[in-house]
Amino acid sequence: MAVLVVAALAPHAAALPDDNRQPITIRTQEAIRDETKGTTVYRGDVEIVQGSLVINADEVTLTQADRPARRASDSRDPLAGSNVMLIEARGAPARMRQLPEPGGEPVHARARIIEYFQPRALIRLRNVVRLRQGRMAMEAARMDYAIDRQVITAWANPATGQRVRTTIPPERLEQ
C-alpha cells in the first residue's frame, strides 16, 4: 500500500480556525434515533454544516458513545479512549467542502464514504476519493485529512491498481 503525504495541498487545506467550535446543524428528509445504540440515521438529501464545513450525502449515521479507555497509540481506531462523535456519510458520491481561510479558495472533496471523527478533527474519505482546491487536484483510494495539523495523507489501492494521483498547476510550483 503506497502512502503519500501531500505538502503542496496541506498549507492551503486547513479549516477556518473556529469551525470545530461551531454547532453542527443537520438537515434531512428523515431522522431515526436509536437510544440503545447511541445512533441517529439521517436519510434523504442530508446536509451537515459546522462553520465552513459542509457535507452532503444520501445517508448519514451519527454515533455518540463511550469507547473503551485504551491508549490511542495502541489502536488503529482514531477515537480509542474518547467519547465518540462519529459522522459517517455515504453517497454516490458524498460531498464535502470547507473554506480554508477567509477569502481563500474552498476545498471540495467527494467519496463514497466520508467519516468525520469530530473530537479528533479528522476527516477520512474512502472509496473513489477526489479532492480539489482551485486547479490543484488529488485522487486516491483513501485519504485522511487531519484538520488541526493541516496534513493530508493519501493511499493507493494495490488490489485495483489505483495509485495516488496529484495534479499541481504551474502557478503553485512557482510559489
Image: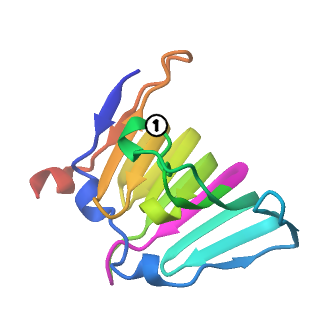
Magenta-colored stretch includes residue 90? yes
The magenta region covers 89-102
Residue 62 or 26: which is nearer the viewer? Answer: 62
Is residue 137 found left or right of 30 in the rendered image?
left
Q: Residue furthest left?
A: 174
Residue 6, given in percent of the width and then of the height, sits at 27, 44
Is residue 90 found left or right of 145 in the rendered image?
right
Up-down relation of residue 76 to residue 169 (above or below): above
**Picture colour scheme:** rainbow
Up-down relation of residue 40 to residue 132 (above or below): below
Q: Which residue is mark 1?
A: 76
Residue at the image point whose x is 55% and y is 15% from the top: 159
Residue 108, given in percent of the width and then of the height, sits at 49, 61
Residue at the image point whose x is 81% and y is 73% from the top: 28
Tally of marks: 1
Residue 5 or 20: which is nearer the viewer? Answer: 20
Up-down relation of residue 48 to residue 146 (above or below): below
Image quadrant for the N terminus?
A: top left
Secondary structure under the numbered disc 1 in the rendered image: loop
Residue 98, given in percent of the width and then of the height, sits at 46, 70
Which quarter of the picture shows residue 27? bottom right
Q: Residue furthest front?
A: 69
Residue 15, given in percent of the width and then of the height, sits at 37, 71
Image quadrant for the C terminus?
A: bottom left
Which quarter of the picture shows residue 31? bottom right
> Is the magenta region chiefly helix, strand or loop?
strand
Residue 161 or 32: which is nearer the viewer? Answer: 32
Q: Disc 1 residue type?
A: Arg
